[in-house]
Amino acid sequence: MREITLSQAVNEALAEEMRRDPTVFILGEDVAEAGTPFKVLSGLVEEFGTTRVIDTPISEPGFVGMAVGAAMTGARPVVDLMFGDFIYLVMDQLCNQAAKQHYMSGGKLTVPMVLRTNLGATRRSAAQHSQSLQALVAHIPGLKVALPSSAYEAKGLMKTAIRDNNPVVIFEDKLMYQDKAPVPEEEYLIPFGVANVKREGRDITLIATSSMVQVAEKAAVILAQEGIEAEVIDPRTIVPLDEKTLLDSVRKTSRAIVIDEGHQSYGVTAEIASRLNEKAFYHLDAPVLRMGAMDVPVPFSPALEDLTVPTPEAVAENARKLCSGELIHAA
Amino acid sequence: MPHDVTMPQLGMAQDAGKIVSWLKSPGDEVAKGDALFEVETDKAVMEVESPANGFLTGVAYAAGDDVPVGQVIARISDSADDDAEPEAQAPEAAAGQADDLPEGHAVTMPQLGMAQDSGLLVNWLKSPGEEVAADDILFEVETDKSTMEVEAGRKGWLAATLAEAGEEVPVGDPVAIIAEAKPEAPVARSVKDGGARPAPAAPVPAEKNTAAAPAKPAAAAPAPKPPSAGGGRILASPKARRLALEQGLDLNRLAKAGHPQPFHVADLEALRKMPAAAAATAPSEAPRRLTATCAEDGLSEFVPWAAETRGLTPDTILAGLAGASLAADGTVTVSVESLGTERRFAVPPGRSLSAVAETEDAPALIVRDLRGTPISTVALGAEEAPVLTIARDGAGLSITLECAARALDPGEAIRLLTDFAGRMEHPLRHLL
Amino acid sequence: MAKPKTNTEDYLRMYRQMVRIRTFEDNANQLYLSAKMPGLTHMYSGEEAVAVGICEALTDDDRITSTHRGHGHCVAKGAEFKAMFCELLGKAEGYCRGKGGSMHIADQSHGNLGANAIVGGSMGIATGSALRAKLQGKDDVTVCFFGDGATAQGLWYEVMNMAALWNLPVIYACENNGYSEYTKTEEIAAGSIMARAEAFGIESHQVDGQDVLAVNELTQKLVARARKGEGPFFMELMTYRYHGHHVGDINREYYRSKDEEKDWKENRDPIIRFRAFLVSEGIASEEEIEAMNAEIEKDAAEAVAYAEKAPYPPAEEVDMHVYAD
């Protein structure tokens, strides 16, 4: 199978959906000729013109609000939010407007829009361009949240997001834009709420999202050399969450670590760990561990920044302790 | 049709208003929009207008009265004579304010037992109006066969008692009110006449509560006692605890043996390997050993037939026959040891051999098949589960049951062996 | 009064719609005061000529976005009393099945994209609706209602910029009732509100919001031009709210005087003024108008009675409509 970058995969997904459905259009800062700072959208304006790939002023609440209105009246906008950190700017439009229209109207109004943005630290971009804020939006009923972990996932999830009748926030890992993965030439979609078991194992389940999936896979390789068989699962969407696949795995392995690049406290890892605890308690032979980004603003200095994100070695070390029955947090 | 005039809802956090003055008198003719009375709330005074043309009738409150929001104050009727009292109507949201309990800190019925939802008030040790210290005992409560004393919790005056001796009070409901100042009019109520809840609008027939309400039977059977070592808590993973419970393993034994905690599933293996130590702790009881003999031809015809028609292995058949002999209500795990291999089977209740499936759970019964060996009798002592040893004995089979005395009482041991020997001799009968 | 139009039916419908709004609000106020209505509500009384003058210039294909003070927009855009009262009381037959309430009534069948409880919250939605119309080559126009208080929100300046850049068919209708919640707007707004829109090159008009014909005539012209791609436009409608910020805001002399309220109610009331005009022009007699008023009052009373008896939504609806299929 051919291999393409995550960036190309997103680009292909958008192009295919825009060809298929004339109501799909792209709105955001520097999306047309510039093709975004990450060049993800390069070439789209040439095919679809500036009426469907629309450069906006630097007015995030304005253009996200406009996407909500366009979506409510028959269009399917894909909004490009240049950095995930800018989500704070658009919280009212996203959480008070987009997320609630369907419910507040008793099911009459729908908001079929996609907010494309990104996450991920270690790009030396410091505290306001490095955050992974998926937990903020996952907390809001009415929003769906997709976290692709490879080019393959990015394409399939984006196409599903565009066809979904709800506001979907899709976070791409900005460090993965140039990473290649096999992506079929034929069309495919990846349904929401279906986790992907990346690797099977009997001893411990590593549930990882987005950027952390490859961290978990590397940890599994380390562990395999020591005779510990880790199962690696990528939920792919955290809203909706494929609870069954996660629970089935944990019932089998009795141990789990949940890894996500958002801040650890009150985060995605906490939510998933809590569900495992509630629904698989009597199958747990060890506490479910959370591994998120350190609870500090992302520092600039490489020497510090690299300390804030979970690494394969750290995941393997925790897995080792859980499997040997060693106390990680003394009771 | 008469129109109700109600106390308007005005402020954002307002639930009652005071009638400052009436601007119309009962029987007056009024027009829609005429000011009827003035209301004071949140420091503002406003006029309440007539909702319709007609006559002011049924005036139920006077100047100076505090009236809950939504309460009907008067009516605008078609005739001045229509002076029926407005129907007593207390909107639920406002009802609480109509109650006149003294202000203070509520002492509530404590939650004591695991499955307890009310407590029986045995007696009062303080009377309404009495001064109390924080650690003074206010009343005694009986619940789940224990009686406990409830303290005031803070210093002050007992301003209200809301239940009488002999009454059941739901957990969390107020039983007493401790006021900071000496109450002018201490209140004594019973649960029957409303307790802490607002008195209902319609008068309840005063019924003297003399007999103590019968104590509610305990709602749930007592939970199995969790394992604990010398009163201390055992640290074990949820899964290890669950498996220990399901397999009848006692984590206390591991703890007493000094096995490092917390216990995980892997530690259960160590626990299973501890029967000798357990026997040593109960030296007075020798293991049980019983032997039976039976013919072999029934089984030797049955096994090939079952393999051909049902696809059953000899081990599955042995497990199924042995499991059924235990006559348990639920699925039992039977281990079959034969020619150096061990396989475990889950045997569900009933006789269906095809429902027997392999499992990894710890066995409740072990079948040791020594027919392929020269051994004819065994006396190996008790193991962690009862063992049925099958050996050749001349033309027939000898079956020996060995188990710890605590595992099966003599009657159970005899029943088990008799049943199993019967099934071995006539396996077809098992199916019928 | 602006120059009269010639269509008698249009006039009578405008009068009727204004009275329907006033009657709806009087009943809603009573429901609140008698503690029959959960929550609280913001009365549109006094501003009827704005909603009616504008909405009578629109078709069902044209969209509006509304505000927390939105009952008037909703009625003017064609909503029915029964479903509105049901919504106010949280009943299953309400426009939003009781999930929205007073501040979120949406009536998509008449192009009402919904009231919004965030001040200025719908400015993006309205502009986005206009962007959609332009992208899809449709000629519908979106009117964004908001109050003078909302002009302090930054979102407005972001979307006005884009609307002007791209000539979007949106009309920003600022209902200037002089008060930003409990504060005189002149105390919180620097410079002129009109000038703010003009700074983006947006053609702006100020109009007497108590004159339904003036409002209607201006809106007709602007809507026709917006359909041709000459938008966006800004209208500042000078009006007045008779009640406080919400029904519970009764003690308001610290921010405005009773004399001021009395003056607007007696001398500038849009319904009284238009009624006098209809009679003097011979369009309707006093008797005909009284009959119309009585009929509307009866409709409202029946709708209230119906809504009071109507069932609440069943419990299983609580988690319905979180996500669309």
Image (cartoon, coloured by chain):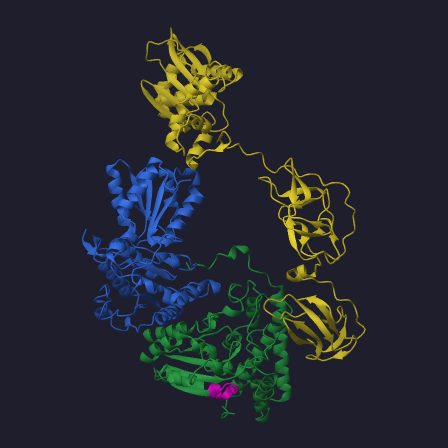
On the rendered structure, is C278 left or right of B190? left
Q: Which chain is blue?
A: A
Query: Does the image show residue C188?
Result: yes
Q: Position of residue B373 (x, y in %)?
A: 32, 11
Chain in yellow colour = B
Q: Give percent across and percent down for residue B217.
A: 65, 37
Residue toward you, C120 or C222: C120
Q: Nearer the viewer, residue C135 or A87?
A: A87
Q: Position of residue B136 (x, y in %)?
A: 67, 45
Q: Which residues are magenta?
A: C207-217
In this rendering, is residue A97 above or below A318?
A: below
Q: Quadrant of residue A244?
A: top left
- Determine the residue located farthest toward the top in the rendered image: B394
Residue C215 lies in the magenta-colored region: yes
- Residue C141 is covered by the magenta coloring: no
Q: Quadrant of residue A98?
A: bottom left
For residue A220, side relative to residue B283 (left or right): left
- Vertical order, C274 against A292 (above or below): below
Q: Residue furthest left?
A: A2
Name the one closer to the observer, C294 or B160: B160
- Which colour represents chain C? green
Q: Position of residue B269 (x, y in %)?
A: 38, 27
Q: Is residue C246 left or right of residue A241?
A: right
